[in-house]
Image: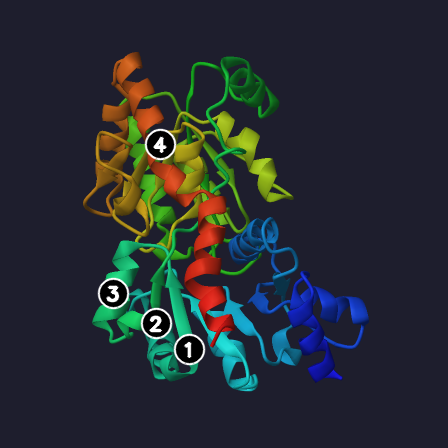
């Protein structure tokens, strides 16, 4: 019966997985590409869903997302992180073609991370492709011995039609909505930087929550009327640190990714204070939203930020250095600041989800489907 379906597919204009789905003869996943996501409504899920939705615009039904990959056989399987790959890969059929994203991680991040990297490198022979978003990580993987032919660099994406610089009225409405005074400098930090999914009192130090608090404290000490805007789960450590420093903050946990739009509209600056990153998504979303970013040299920041032109880069993971760089951006003349925002928005267009989805299809999924 499967042979008959395949022969029928060759004679009609519709796509093979659409015929399979219409006949009802296939059980389990239908789409030729299965993107494995987490159950948690956070970055890995968002990335998978955006890639799926973009590809569906030109190949409907070609990509599905799943959090339960155990029944997948004979597909291209893309795992949202190397951790998910290591969790599931050894349990799955070799009749699949395996792909994983590797966005961040290095042995210096701790013994547990080092162990995962060793296991990941030992699994490379089973992987057909490794996708990473940043030049830093790409070079690191090559140095570790990942074959050049298996490595594909594709940015983490952003919707540049959804995240856009706000009008003055939208900005005022956003600040009013969140109870932010007009005369305060609002700095965003939209991430998960606590261990686990609870209150986040134990810091996830690679995300730099301690550095963020130090930077905010340094800005306050410099006489800047400062306020923090936080989103994301597990932010207890940061909130406690800001309270101790006497720095006001808003913490707004969004239910859906698109709910972040008004949060960015309320900002004056965005800080990436991490010691290690793959993107982060907040970097691209801020740049697209016309929010100047000050970042450590992690993830995609060196790829997208030209210091003083499209944002601010600091050389060290140091709160004082971040604060000084932020102060220099705040001191720009209005015309210079407007130019920086415009250049940042132009620079981040290379990471629009439409381009990211097309690259995944053309550089990863389609070649593997043809093998």
Cα separation, mark 2 vs mark 3, equals 14 Å
* Residue for badge 4: 346
Q: How many marks?
A: 4
Q: Is residue 229 above or below residue 200?
A: above
SS class, disc 4: helix
Q: Residue at x 45, y 27 (%)?
A: 267
In the picture of the structure, the residue carrying the numbered disc 3 is 140
Whole-angstrom CA distance, mark 2 to mark 1, is 8 Å
Viewer-nearest of discs 4 and 3: 4
Which of these two is toward me, 334 or 133? 133
Contact, CB < 8 Å: mark 2 with mark 3?
no
- Do residues under tags 2 and 1 come within 8 Å of each other at their CB atoms? yes
Identify the residue position indicated by label 2 in the image: 150
Residue at x 58%, y 55% (from the top left corner): 52
Report how far apart the C-alphas of labels 2 and 4 lie in the structure.
30 Å
Percent coordinates x, y for residue 116 in the rendering = 38, 76
- Left or right placement of residue 176 versus residue 274 in this view: right
Marks 2 and 1, the one that precedes in the sequence: 1
- Residue at which label 1 appears: 127
Q: Quadrant of the N terminus?
A: bottom right
Please say if 37 is above or below 117.
above
In the image, taking residue 218 as reference, residue 356 lies left or right, namely: right
How many other residues sit within 10 Å of disc 4, few (<14), some (14-19) or many (≥20)? some
Q: In the rendered image, which quarter is residue 253 located in?
A: top right
Looking at the image, is 238 positioned above or below residue 74?
above
Marks 4,1: beta carbons within 8 A: no
- Gap in Å between the C-alphas at discs 1 and 3? 17 Å
Comparing labels 2 and 3, the label whose residue is closer to the camera: 2
Whether 73 is drawn above or below 35: the answer is below
């Amino acid at each position: 019966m499967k042979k008959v379906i395949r022969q029928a597919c060759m004679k009609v204009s519709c796509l093979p997985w659409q015929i399979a789905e219409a006949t009802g003869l296939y059980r389990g996943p239908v789409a030729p590409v299965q993107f494995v996501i987490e159950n948690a409504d956070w970055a890995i899920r968002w990335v998978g869903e955006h890639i799926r939705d973009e590809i569906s615009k030109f190949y409907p039904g070609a990509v599905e997302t799943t959090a339960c990959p155990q029944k997948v056989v004979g597909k291209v399987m893309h795992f949202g992180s190397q951790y998910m790959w290591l969790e599931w890969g050894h349990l799955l059929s070799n009749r699949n073609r395996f792909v994983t994203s590797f966005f961040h991680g290095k042995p210096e991040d701790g013994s547990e991370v080092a162990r995962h990297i060793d296991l990941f490198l030992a699994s490379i022979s089973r992987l057909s492709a490794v996708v990473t978003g940043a030049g830093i990580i790409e070079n690191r993987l090559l140095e570790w011995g990942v074959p050049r032919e298996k490595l594909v660099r594709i940015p983490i994406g952003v919707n540049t039609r959804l995240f856009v610089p706000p009008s003055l009225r939208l900005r005022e409405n956003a600040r009013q909505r969140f109870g932010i005074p007009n005369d305060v400098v609002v700095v965003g930090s939209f991430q998960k930087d606590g261990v686990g999914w609870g209150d986040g009192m134990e810091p996830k130090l690679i995300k730099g929550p301690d550095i963020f608090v130090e930077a905010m404290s340094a800005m306050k000490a410099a006489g800047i009327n400062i306020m923090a805007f936080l989103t994301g789960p597990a932010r207890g450590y940061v909130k406690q640190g800001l309270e101790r420093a006497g720095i006001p903050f808003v913490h707004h946990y969004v239910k859906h990714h698109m709910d972040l739009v008004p949060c960015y509209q309320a900002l004056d600056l965005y800080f990436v204070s991490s010691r290690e990153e793959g993107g982060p998504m907040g970097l691209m979303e801020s740049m697209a939203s016309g929010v100047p970013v000050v970042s450590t040299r992690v993830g995609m920041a060196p790829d997208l930020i030209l210091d003083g032109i499209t944002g601010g880069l600091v050389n060290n993971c140091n709160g004082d250095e971040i604060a000084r760089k932020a102060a220099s951006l705040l001191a720009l003349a209005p015309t210079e600041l407007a130019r920086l925002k415009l250049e940042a928005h132009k620079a981040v267009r290379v990471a629009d989800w439409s381009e990211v989805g097309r690259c995944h299809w053309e550089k990863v999924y389609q070649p593997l489907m043809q093998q």
